[in-house]
Amino acid sequence: QSGYRSALARLTADAEDNISSAATWLLKSWLEKGGAITTKQTAELCAQMPGVTSWPAQLHLCQSIRFLDVTKDDAAAVHRWLIPLLAHDRPFVRAWSLDALASLARQHSHLHDAFAKALEHAEQDEAASVRARARNIGPIA
């Protein structure tokens, strides 16, 4: 229905973790199956990211960024959101925030250096899942 994905974008930062996690999972599933969201919906989603506190929702968003066309202005905001996630307690969040940063750097060359530093750090991570994600990201240029 019209407005469904915009409504999900608004729910990503819901105070109830279950709602936030469900909304991000639905968006991620839609995108993985070839769905798309508009530039406006992407901007709405990016604007919600700072309020996302549920780790599963953070993970889903990190896994979804590869499917989004993020504007330069939104990329700066998403990059700021990703920085603390690169050091998250949960290894999968660390791994997928690195993947999300790689996706942003592919779209926006001004993030190449930030990604290179994050990649170097991830290659030394104690968690095998983070090191494996770092190895499997591939070139960003």
Image (spheres, grey):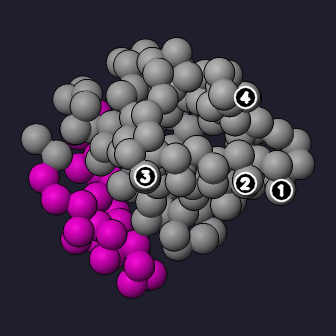
What is the CA distance from the residue labelled 3 to the residue labelled 4?
A: 19 Å
Name above or below for residue 6 compared with residue 122: above
Which secondary structure class fits the magenta region best?
Answer: helix
Residue that badge 2 annotates: 21
Q: Residues within 10 Å of mark 4 (few under 14, many from 20)?
A: some
Relative image position of residue 107 (x, y in whole percent): 25, 31
What are the residue bounds of the magenta stretch? 111-139
Extreme residue toward the front, this view: 1
Label 3: state its secondary structure.
loop
- Front position in the image: 30 or 28: 30
Residue type for callout 1: Asn
Q: Which is more foreground, mark 1 or mark 3?
A: 3
Q: Earlier in the sequence, mark 1 or mark 3?
A: 1
Relative image position of residue 20 (x, y in whole percent): 76, 47
Residue that badge 4 annotates: 7
Marks 2 and 1 in Cβ contact (< 8 Å) = yes
Name above or below for residue 140 compared with residue 39: below
